[in-house]
Image (cartoon, rainbow, N blue to C red):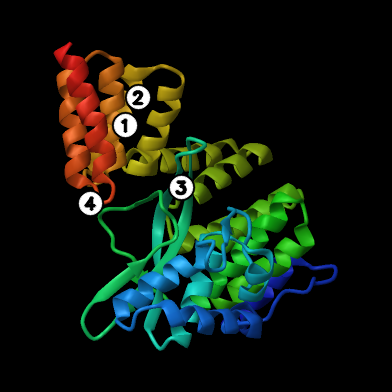
Amino acid sequence: MLSASLMAAVLALTQFSEPLALPERDEVMAIPPELRAELDEGLKTAGSAPQQRIEWLSAFLFSPEGLGLEYTHDSTGTIAETYASREANCLSATLMFLALADELGFNARPQEYRRALIWSQEEDTVYRIAHVNVHIRTNDATFTVDFEPYLITDGDRRPRPIGEDRLLAHFYNNRAAEHMSRHEYVAALNAIQRALSLDERFVPAWNNLGVVKQRQGRYESAEDAFLRALSVHSTNESVLSNLASLYAAMGETDLLKRYERRLQRAQRRDPFHQFEKGLALEDQGQYQQARRHFRRAISHHDREPLFHFALARAHYELGAMRRATWALRRAIQTSQPEQQPIYEEKLNTLQERRRR
């Protein structure tokens, strides 16, 4: 919980006109009777072994024979809301899986990646988030269940277990971001306050608080929120970028330069930033420059197949076929078994073209 002084600070920063209704924590995870009935009926066709039941439950959420949920990035709902709408983002699906896994008696726990990129192959876009998934331990094995298929994580850090408070902080902060996208700032601030009351060190909520305050023209309050975020995570690039933008709007030239330098230092060491920069240059047809950034990404994180695949594309466009082949082989070596056929097909196509 927030300390009394921090709670007072948050309230002073937000100054709600009238807090809008948010689901209480028990409502977020509550399983509707109709869903429980569908679960019980579906279990009749599931196997009895733990792995069979985990695989069945994962499929149950999204298959037409089960709930038939459809993925939408901006649908952060309670379990009841997700069940009613049949729409879910990664967090909503994770919440539902955790609750249903608990019904089945599994030892399922949420875990968090502090830094991750989500890669959307359909739209060729990337965006950065704090990502959660599920860890399950049985008597014989452990499993990870993740509902985000195009995930790039920091190869140097494993996901860390989190408690229910931290998980629900993600939920309320996601709701805040969705309200912000619709310019519903009172509702957004209410959700941010709820997130921070659960975890006062939750950087994304402090960052969102700063963004809302800046949009409202309350620059000092925005600065307080961004600095609070940096006191927890001093190299968070999103916060550093937002704070630099704030100082530019305030005309604080010296502070702007200071935080731009801090941002640039963080970006030079960040494989995610280098990859994003490379993608932008590749999209512009600047393959030589793109290749340089892909190489930098790999120098900081050499176990991500998408980085090697991007480097292969740049080599190919520049006519460096042998290097493109080598990069594709590295993509195969670093990818999961289910991903390898995709890169193997690319490699076979490239080798056929080299033989012509």
Tag 4 and tag 1, C-beta contact below 8 Å: no
Q: Quick check: 347 above or below 57?
A: above
Tag 3 and tag 2, C-beta contact below 8 Å: no
- Residue identifier under label 1: 310
- Mark 3 or mark 1: which is in front? 1
Q: CA distance from mark 2 to mark 1?
A: 9 Å
Seen at 62% across and 68% down, the residue is 172
- Residue identifier under label 3: 237
First of labels 3, 2 by sequence position:
3
Q: CA distance from mark 3 to mark 1?
A: 23 Å
- SS at circle 3: helix
- Mark 4 or mark 1: which is in front? 4
Q: Position of residue 212 (x, y in %)?
A: 69, 54
Three-letter amino acid code at disc 4? Pro
- Residue identifier under label 2: 290
Residue 31, label in figure: none
Three-letter amino acid code at disc 3? Glu
First of labels 3, 1 by sequence position:
3
- Residue identifier under label 4: 337
First of labels 2, 4 by sequence position:
2
